[in-house]
Amino acid sequence: MRFAPATFRWIVLVTAIMVLCSDASPAGSETDTIVIASIHTVGNRRTQEYIILRELTFSAGDTLTGKQLEQALKTSQDNLMRLSLFHFADFSVHPSPDNKGTDISISLTERWYTWLWPVFEIADRNPNAWLENGDFRRISYGLFFQQENFRGRMEKLHLRFKAGYQQQLGLLYEAPYLNRKKTLGAGIMVTLGRERETAIKTLEDRLIYHRDEDFLRWYTGADLFLRYRPGIHHSHTLTAQLNRFRFSDTLLSLNPDYAGTGDEKVVIPRLSYLLKADFRDQRGYPLRGWYADALLEWTGILPFSEFNYLTLRSSARKHVPLHGRWNLAAGAAIKISTAGTKPWFLNQAMGYGRDYVRGYEYKVLDGDNFWITKVNLKYALLNEKIVWLNRIKAKQFNTIPFSVHAGVYADAGQVWTKGEEENTGLKRSVLTGAGLGLDFVTYYDKVVRTEFSVNREGQAGFFVHFMAAI
């Protein structure tokens, strides 16, 4: 059962009164206290209990006021939902059998954790760039085995096989907790691949592709990472990467700067440090809270490397509930690189992932540095509703939450490099875009965004994306 916020507050209030006697002052005051006698979890058939308890901001034996308990339960619910392990996490409070404290029950609905997905991926940066060309040869297909919450310990095990445009084998394993304090985690990722077609250069702010009967590039890579998560909201990740590339003569003749050095074989070592702070209510489509990260990369850390430069990337996002169904979101991102020899294919700036100005989905800008800001004002046409499919017995699939949000937005951004001769096309210009959007959100963090955007040049278009904009 899920409780509305008003109902939830009344449950806490009534429970506190029952625990503290009928003549006590109202729960939530600074003088009343509630002793947490025990914590029980229900519905976690796969997930180990310690995974759940670690995300709580309270423990058995704690003494809280009614107001503190209400806030602790809400924060703990957000923490559990950010794990992407559960569809729902509902809390209930009731007096302990001996009436000397309060028992807390956590009712969980687990997700389905084992998937064998058919791989059907486009090689372009976003679906809009692929639809512009409509080239079915740039589609990869294969199988992706995804095991989340492996052994019920929140471990990840991913195996990927791709054929077609991009041929790839990949393995990822991550263990979030290695020590008794549950603060240290680690993982490994190994990738092998080869491509007959790839983007070879940027011309007039668009990627130019080349296809050949023979393979144009081969790559192997290994990542080892160590993660330190001392609390709930902050994490520190140290990653050591070693990537080896081999390029065909055809590829290097088409773009001598592709590898940065002109060599047929290139080894790129990299050491990175990532700091994250996550105070959002959920990951897939947050409506409350904030998130920030900072990534510092040292490319060419080993003595034999021909590369030696630093890159700093950082982003921040803020989500603010307004009156009624209104919500405001704002975000910013920045990249700054030092001078040094850089492979063309790694020196990406605007047009990849979240780093684009809406209205410029067909454009891509390379460069050492960029900044982007985004603002969204959204209205919930349909607050989260739950459809119950009674004919389906599995709880992982018989409850489908979904919501619909409409909104307006405005973005701005700029890319620049240190050499003036390289600042051509849209570089150095402040790009702006604005428009109207409709977002559909459903379970397993799936988001479909449909947007109509107009950019600074007056170019308008209809675009589709599959992640939250901010």
Image (cartoon, rainbow, N blue to C red):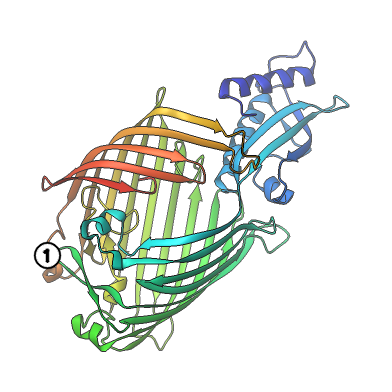
Quadrant of the snapshot with the N terminus: top right
Above or below, 93 relative to 318: above
- x, y percent for residue 261: 27, 85
- x, y percent for residue 445: 48, 46
- Looking at the rendering, which quadrant does residue 220 occupy? bottom left
- Looking at the rendering, which quadrant does residue 254 occupy? bottom left
User: Residue visible at 72% across and 47% down?
Assistant: 45
Q: How many marks?
A: 1
- Looking at the rendering, which quadrant does residue 313 occupy? bottom left
Looking at the image, residue 404 sits to the left or right of residue 58; the answer is left
Instruction: Give the residue pinned by disc 1.
Output: 424
Q: Is residue 315 visible?
A: yes
Q: Nearer the viewer, residue 142 or 30?
A: 142
- x, y percent for residue 76: 62, 39
Question: Label 1: how many residues lie within 10 Å, few (<14), some (14-19) or many (20+)?
Answer: some
Of all residues, the one furthest to the right in this rendering is 98
User: Residue visible at 80% across and 15% down?
Assistant: 21
Above or below, 272 relative to 126: below
Q: Is residue 57 visible?
A: no
Say what secondary structure mark 1 lies in: loop
- Amino acid type shown at disc 1: Thr
User: Residue visible at 31% across and 55% down?
Assistant: 127
Of all residues, the one furthest to the top in this rendering is 23
Q: Nearer the viewer, residue 270 or 212?
A: 212
- x, y percent for residue 376: 32, 38
Above or below, 464 relative to 253: above
Q: Nearer the viewer, residue 420 or 413?
A: 413
Quadrant of the snapshot with the C terminus: top left
